Image (cartoon, grey):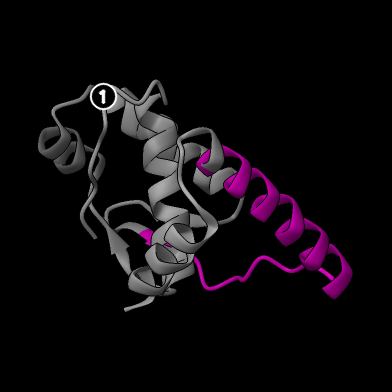
């Protein structure tokens, strides 16, 4: 997994890391049991303070997305996020609404979003 930061986005670096782990998980780019870079290695690669990586990994651990095994590394958990069908649909509707709204503020159309999502799957 490769991380990319946008230092001009206004989104804190630790949040960008968290979001990218979630996106990679959702897209299938990383799967359960896969190892993530060490805190030290990711800090060097991204040229950020290791405490930033620790904060992101810790938050992901608290939500059950990652697990750290001393001396072995940090891994994506095999425990899926469980929600009822109604809760999943409600959350999906909320996320889509926010996504379309934010894209609209940037002057993007729904068709452009659909095209980009189609390319994201590939």
Q: Quadrant of the N terminus?
A: bottom left
Give, as a single range, the part of the protein colored magenta.
75-103
In the displayed structure, 114 sits above or below 36; it is below
111 in magenta = no
Residue 37 % position (x, y) = 23, 52
**Can residue 67 be seen from the camera position used here?**
no
Q: Nearer the viewer, residue 87 or 61?
A: 87
The number of callouts visible is 1
In the displayed structure, 51 sits above or below 56; it is above
Q: Main secondary structure of the magenta part?
A: helix
Q: Residue furthest right?
A: 86
Q: Nearer the viewer, residue 118 or 105?
A: 105
Residue 73 % position (x, y) = 29, 56
Asked which quadrant contains residue 86, the reply is bottom right
What residue is pinned by disc 1? 7
Q: Is residue 100 left or right of residue 108?
A: right
Q: Residue at x 20, y 55 (%)?
A: 2
């Amino acid at each position: 997994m490769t991380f990319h930061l946008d230092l001009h986005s206004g989104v804190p670096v630790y949040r960008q890391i968290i979001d990218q782990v979630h996106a990679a998980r959702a897209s299938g780019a990383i799967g359960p049991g896969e190892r993530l870079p060490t805190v030290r290695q990711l800090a060097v690669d991204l040229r950020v303070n290791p405490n930033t990586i620790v904060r992101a990994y810790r938050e992901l651990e608290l939500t059950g997305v990652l697990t750290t095994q001393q001396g072995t590394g940090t891994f994506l958990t095999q425990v899926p996020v469980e929600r009822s069908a109604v809760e999943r649909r409600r959350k999906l509707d909320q996320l889509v609404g926010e996504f379309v709204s934010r894209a609209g503020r940037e002057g993007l159309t729904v068709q452009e979003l659909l095209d980009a999502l189609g390319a994201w799957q590939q």
